[in-house]
Amino acid sequence: MDAFIENGEYEKARDTAVRYLSYRARSRAEIENKLKESGFDDEVSRFVIERLESYGYIDDIKFSQMFIHDKTVISGFGSERIIRELKEKGVNSDIIEECVVDAELRESDAESALRVLMKKRPRFGSDERRKAIDFLLRKGYPYEAAEHAFREINDKQ
């Protein structure tokens, strides 16, 4: 490792990782991929990532919790889409499951789908069932939650 520090590889890799993290929180896998794309040695990348984790700059649990919060509150996404996107970002399945359970994400899918659909209510009449359900499915809600939300809205009319 001393050779990497002496020739400046560690600093370059660290600066690349920190710059990448400065835009938004990232998963460990995203940082690994960025360093690999930038041409850094696996040993240097591993050392940089371990150092940034020890400082708290990389934390897949905190990243997942923030991601779940942002995607449910701001974007109105359902659990299936959030889980898929976290997997695409390289977050470990055990961490995803733990964070989903902690956030009670699956239990709130029906309520959240109803809230999202209520915002779009003028666009979906009783004859536009397929359109409303497809909208919620694209947002990542399970079919049952989408169907339930549509029925709830139509029962209120």
Image (cartoon, rainbow, N blue to C red):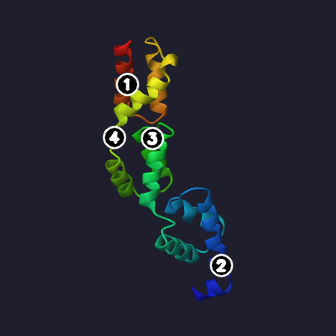
Q: Is residue 14 left or right of residue 49?
A: right
Q: Quarter of the image holding residue 40?
A: bottom right
Mark 4 crowd level (few <14, some 14–19, many ≥20, 10 Å Cα): some
Q: Quadrant for residue 151, please give it.
A: top left
Amino acid beneath label 1: Ala
Q: Relative to 110, say whether 34 is above or below.
A: below
Measure the alpha-carbon separation of dots 1 and 4.
14 Å
Q: Are marks 3 and 4 in contact (CB under 8 Å)?
A: no
The answer to whether mark 2 and mark 3 are in CB contact below 8 A is no
Q: In the displayed structure, does residue 15 sit left or right of residue 57?
A: right
Image coordinates for residue 103, horizontal then vertical, percent: 35, 47
Residue 89 appears at what percent x and percent y? 51, 54
What amino acid type is highlighted by mark number 2?
Glu
List the residue tagged with mark 3.
Answer: 72
Which of these two is toward me, 9 or 61? 61
Q: Quadrant of the N terminus?
A: bottom right
Amino acid type indicated by mark 3: Thr
Horizontal and vertical percent position of residue 106: 33, 40
Q: Which residue is mark 2?
A: 9
Q: Nearer the viewer, residue 18 or 38?
A: 18
Label 1: which residue? 149
Relative vertical location of residue 137 with respect to residue 41 in this rendering, above or below = above
